[in-house]
Amino acid sequence: MNGMKWIFALGLLLGLFAALPLGAANPPNSAANWDNLKTLAPGEKTGIVLNGKKSYDGKFQSLAENAIVVRLAAGGQTFTRDSVLRVSTKGQSHRLRNAVIGVAVGAGIGAGAGAAQSDNDAYVFAYYVPFLAVVGALGGAVIPSGGWHDVYRAR
């Protein structure tokens, strides 16, 4: 049974380490440039934080040289550049992709662990692969993804 704990811990650690670089794929850009808001698409989920720390969530509508228009639940709202502290967008979730990678890593570790058994019992091999694949899937699914990303941040 001690061998099972070791294999479980190894599978969990390898699955987490394999998925960690996924969040580092997009390096941060200089968010202090108002022109970054030109990359927003109409209808994109957007969060606005004002200088007074009040925040609003809505969908991006349009951009002017000194203002941004966001559709809130109550209708369109214009925020002037001087009053905006931060503008963020909600990224796309990658939980399914991370779970699939976790399945592959866990199944690979399970296959290796099953093959490493001295008796090469088919039952042991068949146990390790699905068990560690499920552990890898869960590990990949819980990795945070698609959170809020700053597009603009006042200096």
Image (tube, rainbow, N blue to C red):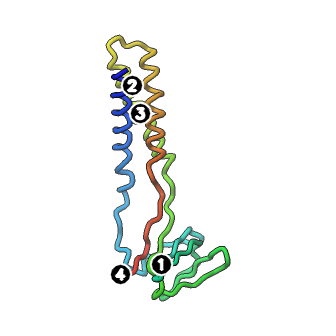
The reply to whether discs 1 and 2 touch (Cβ–Cβ < 8 Å) is no
Q: Provide the residue designation for mark 4.
A: 155
Residue at point 60%, 70% (across, down): 43
- Which residue is the extreme one toward the top? 119
**Element under disc 4:** loop
Measured as percent of width and height from the top left, residue 149 is found at 44, 66
Q: Is residue 73 above or below residue 67?
A: above
Name the amino acid type tagged 4: Arg
Q: Residue at x 48, y 58 (%)?
A: 146
Q: Quadrant of the C terminus?
A: bottom left
Q: Which residue is mark 3?
A: 106
Kind of residue sitting beneath label 2? Ala
Q: First in sequence: mark 4 or mark 1?
A: 1
Give the percent coordinates (x, y) of residue 122: 44, 14
How many numbered discs sit on the rendered protein? 4
Earlier residue among tags 3 and 2 = 3
Which residue is labeled 2 in the image? 111
What residue is pinned by disc 1? 53
Q: Amino acid at mark 3?
A: Gly
Mark 1 against mark 2, which lies toward the viewer? Answer: 1
